[in-house]
Image (cartoon, coloured by chain):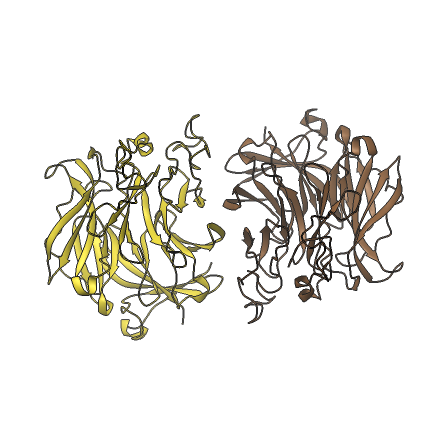
Chain colours: A yellow, B brown
Amino acid sequence: MKFATVALATSMALGASALVTATAEAKTIETRWADVEVETVAEGLVRPWGIAFLPEGRLLVTEMEGRLRIIEADGSLGEPIRGVPEVTVRNQGGLLDVALAPDFETSNRIYLTWSEAETSGSNVTSTAVAHAVLGDGELHNLTTIFSQYPKVEGGRHYGGRMVFSHDGRYLYVGLGDRGHQMKESQDLDSHTGTLIRLYANGEVPQDNPFVGQEGALPEIWSYGHRNIQGIDIQPSTGLMWAVEHGPQGGDELNLPEPGKNYGWPLITHGEAYGGGQMSETISFNKDGMELPVWHWTPSIAVSGMTFYDGDAFPEWQGNVLAAGLRGQVIARLEIDGNRVIHEERMAVDYRIREIRQGPDGYLYLLTDERDNAKVLRLRPAQ
Amino acid sequence: MKFATVALATSMALGASALVTATAEAKTIETRWADVEVETVAEGLVRPWGIAFLPEGRLLVTEMEGRLRIIEADGSLGEPIRGVPEVTVRNQGGLLDVALAPDFETSNRIYLTWSEAETSGSNVTSTAVAHAVLGDGELHNLTTIFSQYPKVEGGRHYGGRMVFSHDGRYLYVGLGDRGHQMKESQDLDSHTGTLIRLYANGEVPQDNPFVGQEGALPEIWSYGHRNIQGIDIQPSTGLMWAVEHGPQGGDELNLPEPGKNYGWPLITHGEAYGGGQMSETISFNKDGMELPVWHWTPSIAVSGMTFYDGDAFPEWQGNVLAAGLRGQVIARLEIDGNRVIHEERMAVDYRIREIRQGPDGYLYLLTDERDNAKVLRLRPAQ
């Protein structure tokens, strides 16, 4: 891939067709089907984690330290919105994802995930989900609809990504193994290392796979996950796919089916930090456990993922685009049914936390810096 | 990947455990699961194309210009074996693959494919299959059991790879579109662009998918192929997989099922030579046509392929290893069911024509030079 840095005379040079006006430099990545321009839409963020698309070209972005901000169509950052949950900011914990309710247009309701403390300031935390009504500069009627059980010490592997089903009835939330208690990912009496499905109001759908099974938590959709960091609905099928961090290597793309076991920590394509197989009891596959649809080994430190169905990059329709933190790449995966049939990587040269398709068909990325993190946008080069 | 060239004091330094004694330099390729030593087993070949493993560490190798040779266990080349078919050597035509009969131990029978002329010396050719008994320096009872219909002018896209089913009953042969008559790959009244299945004696199995269908040739197993260059049986399932050359890009790994259409030239992931989509009538997919399990785009110019089930590289068991000509790589594909879930490439730095697993669990490669081509072997580095 070749890079060209293009200095733009003014932000206005990019024209009015874009959802948000880019404010700074752009560079071009040559790919098989398109020359992709990487524009800076906004900057000055601190560890942004989640993004949602408001009407009229405005963005809603979370910052891990507990701020929720609107980014205006001109790229300017709004003041933090008041009334977000109190978050425990520690390591990977903080304010995590944001999503609009399917009926946002009429309800103004949004959803948030965050690391929720047992008591204020405590290091005993778990991932929680709330909804609230987005008013003018503040949230109203904040209502917690889910708290991962159990709350534990330590600040790793919160998961936290959300997506609604196409019909808007179901909310999927990817969780994590919380880092130090991996084995619980195989148990159904905790939410550790699971992916859950709720109704939009937080109630449990009675056709969830473990409803009525003694000792199993009814919210669980699938289990045996390590740390789900990206989640989206496949446009052609309505099926929910997810990516998760592996250990050293073994980042996975999965197609989580109800009631199925994705194997962590008993199967993985990753290896122990420092090299070698994780342990003699860990293997590539075991009966009764699902293999990934794809794995990245060595790891790209996969973060967000989105299916693409826009018009800006017509050859990418139906593809998965997955972002990498350490890898600083976007992986474009061509999909046939439940298979990946090709991978192309685009070097973005930023640690990418999240990738989502905007309503304009462009791709929006969050970079991961503590200092001056950005919203980037991928669009076809002119 | 890192390379180290290791000069060996003498060929004997490699020890007696190897099937064939290496005769020259070795180099090491670092891969995820093994440091792989690339040894030269034999050299001095001219455009070798097919390889088979005789008892006692001897190899049987074809050269495109019409020679079949035994390579002794010490790497020395035998004189050409007399009695091979007359081949039309032109462009991609010549003596192609060689395989041992399943009952070789008692019958001494071998199978050959080659570009067979309509009349001696003619440029009107097609791919043919014969068997013969391998005697002392010559072939006996050469019997042609199949000739691709129709014979046409031109010297491209002969296919020619063979593999027997695990039970030895069936012989699969991959064919090509002959280069200039692509559309016939969609027709069933020619063998152009098909993969065929025969009994070992050349008779047509009556459960072949098009037996009894008017206007269809009964040998056809699957169709819509461009130029099949590698073919092997999956150890765990007994299913036959194949790789084929795409146009510029779009090399494919397929799992050819009986009666199915693999889409050439109507669907491909390749593009026209020089760039751009092949034409407006060509797309990635169409109803009723099968997508590949995997495609290499840009092309590696895929040639041979083999499943690995040896003990020398235990982590590779069940993997596909596919070789590239222009790519000069071996692609290692991890397989789950009908999916590729990971690719790793090893840079061999030779144009590779064929890759097969030897009875010793090492991998044998043929390089593609007209001058001093080699048999290489991949084994775990010491």
- Which x, y percent locates residue B113? 78, 49
- Which x, y percent locates residue B148? 77, 56
- Which x, y percent locates residue A314? 44, 66
Q: Is residue A8 above or below residue A122?
A: below
Task: Name which residue lies at 40% across and 43% down.
Answer: A252
Instruction: Using the rendered image of the protein, determine whether residue A167 is visible from the camera's viewpoint.
Output: yes
Q: A208 or B42: nearer the eye?
A: A208
Q: Is residue A1 above or below residue B50?
A: below
Question: A155 left or right of B168?
Answer: left
Q: B37 or B289: nearer the eye?
A: B289
Instruction: Using the rendered image of the protein, determine whether residue A371 is visible from the camera's viewpoint.
Output: no
- Which x, y percent locates residue B173? 72, 49
Q: Is residue B132 above or below residue A60?
A: above
Q: Is residue A380 above or below residue B67?
A: below
Question: B81 left or right of B8?
Answer: right
Q: Quadrant of residue A275?
A: top left
